[in-house]
């Protein structure tokens, strides 16, 4: 995986960028943290989110959110993408970028958005 920058939950939320749901992974935050060296934060003031991490890859204006919460099944992590200010989101391209960088094995992908 190429270099990435982690983005804080409050910073990303405040930017109010367009957001698209991409997929659900059969991986816990602990498994993702160990495999990809991504740090998750516990979110206490957001009712829908328990654990959160967001990354942006060098040269991309997309932010990939990985999170768990009350609506997410136990042992799984949801992945959404937020788009750049002016460009909006091409969900299919974002999905391809996520898959090419994270390279999950297919049994780890539980669900893919119907919009892809």
Image (cartoon, rainbow, N blue to C red):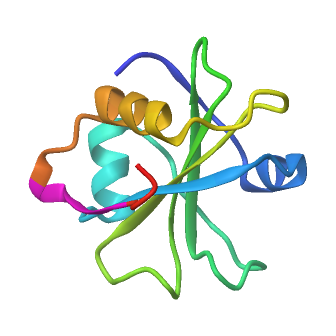
Q: Measuring 23% from the left and 34% from the top, which residue is drawn there?
A: 103
Q: Residue furthest front?
A: 115
Residue 116: image x %, image y %?
A: 40, 49
Q: Measuring 75% from the left and 27% from the top, which residue is drawn there?
A: 87
Q: Is residue 81 above or below residue 76?
A: above
Residue 98: image x %, image y %?
A: 40, 35
Q: Measuring 37% from the left and 31% from the top, which residue is drawn there?
A: 96
> Is 57 or 24 nearer to us in this picture?
24
Magenta stretch: helix, strand or loop mostly? strand
Residue 9: image x %, image y %?
A: 73, 55
Horizontally, is 77 left or right of 69 in the view? left
> Is 29 or 80 nearer to us in this picture?
80
Horizontally, is 27 left or right of 18 in the view? left
Q: Which residues are magenta?
A: 107-112
Residue 34: image x %, image y %?
A: 30, 46
Horizontally, is 55 left or right of 106 in the view? right
> Is 39 or 86 nearer to us in this picture?
86
Q: Is residue 23 above or below residue 84?
A: below
Q: Is residue 108 above or below residue 85?
A: below
Determine if the magenta segment contains residue 28: no
Horizontally, is 44 left or right of 38 in the view? right
């Amino acid at each position: 995986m190429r270099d990435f920058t982690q983005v804080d939950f409050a910073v990303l939320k405040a930017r109010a960028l367009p957001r698209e749901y991409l997929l659900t992974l059969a991986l816990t935050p602990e498994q993702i943290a160990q495999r990809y060296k991504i740090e998750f934060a516990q979110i206490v003031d957001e009712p829908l989110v328990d654990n959160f991490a967001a990354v942006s890859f060098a040269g991309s204006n997309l932010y990939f959110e990985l999170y768990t919460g009350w609506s997410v099944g136990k042992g799984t992590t949801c992945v959404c993408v937020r788009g750049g200010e002016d460009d909006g989101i091409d969900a299919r391209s974002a999905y391809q970028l996520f898959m090419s960088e994270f390279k999950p094995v297919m049994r780890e992908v539980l669900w893919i958005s119907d919009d892809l």
